[in-house]
């Protein structure tokens, strides 16, 4: 048998296994989207939260709009030592987003974040006023960290 024929047979034999290799099982991808904690908080809100509609003004400043109508959210609320904490699960843009809010007297402090807990925008909303974007990033980040720490303590199996 010539060297050419044996090389050709080896090539044809290896080519016949290609379809089998394509069907081989791939390693399973992780079940979380951006962060395991984010997925756990989504699960907690979906299983224990309640459906609600929120006013669109503050959410519009954060880039979350529903053509001027109220925003549908799944909401979870709890009282902390320093006020009422609420986390909203928003799915307006076909992705999960969180809006954390905390009441401090007559002012609501709201933060939008992705499921990796990256703060996207922060808004202050006075009871008898209009919402305004928080430009003090140090204050916004500190309050955001405090709010997510509150909810991290409530995530089961953290």
Image: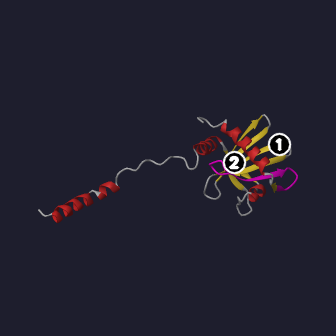
Q: Position of residue 103 (x, y in %)?
A: 80, 43
**Please, is residue 7 above or below residue 118 in the view?**
below
Which residue is identified by label 2? 88
Question: Left of 141 or right of it: where is 33?
Answer: left
**Mark 2 and mark 1 in contact (Cβ < 8 Å)?**
no
Picture residue at 74% right of the left edge, 62% below the top = 68
Q: Which residue is at 34% across, 56% downward?
A: 22
Q: Farthest residue to the front: give it.
A: 3
User: What residue is at 44 percent from the left and 47 percent from the top?
Assistant: 28
90 in relation to 103, above or below: below
Is disc 1 placed on a helix, strand or loop? strand
Inter-mark Cα distance, 1 to 2: 17 Å
Instruction: Find the residue positioned furthest to the right.
Output: 128
> How are the residues colored?
secondary structure
Position of residue 151 measured from the top left corner of the image (x, y, whole percent):
68, 39
Q: Is residue 115 magenta?
A: yes
Task: Please give the residue where the numbered disc 1 appears in the rendered image.
Answer: 104
**Quadrant of the frame with the N terminus:** bottom left
Label whose residue precedes the other's in the sequence (1 or 2): 2
The magenta segment is: 113-131
Task: Give the quadrant of residue 7.
Answer: bottom left
Q: Nearer the viewer, mark 1 or mark 2?
A: 1
* Secondary structure found at label 2: strand
Q: Label 1: how many residues lie within 10 Å, few (<14), some (14-19) or many (20+)? A: few
Between 3 and 48, the one nearer to me in the picture: 3
Front-most of 88 and 53?
88
Percent from the top left, x then y, of residue 65?
71, 60
Q: Nearer the viewer, residue 29 or 51?
A: 29
Q: Which mark is residue 123?
A: none
């Amino acid at each position: 048998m010539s060297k050419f024929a044996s090389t050709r047979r080896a090539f044809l034999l290896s080519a016949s296994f290609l379809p089998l290799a394509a069907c081989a099982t791939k390693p399973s991808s992780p079940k979380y989207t951006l962060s395991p904690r984010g997925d756990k908080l989504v699960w907690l809100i979906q299983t224990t939260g309640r459906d609600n509609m929120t006013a669109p003004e503050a959410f519009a400043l954060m880039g979350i709009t529903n053509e001027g109508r109220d925003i549908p959210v799944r909401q979870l609320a709890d009282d902390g030592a320093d006020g009422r904490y609420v986390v909203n699960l928003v799915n307006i843009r076909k992705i999960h987003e969180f809006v954390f809010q905390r009441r401090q007297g007559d002012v609501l402090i709201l933060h939008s974040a992705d499921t990796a807990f990256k703060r996207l925008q922060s808004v202050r909303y006075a009871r008898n006023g209009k919402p305004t974007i928080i430009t003090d990033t140090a204050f916004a980040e500190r309050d955001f960290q405090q709010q997510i720490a509150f909810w991290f303590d409530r995530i089961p199996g953290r």
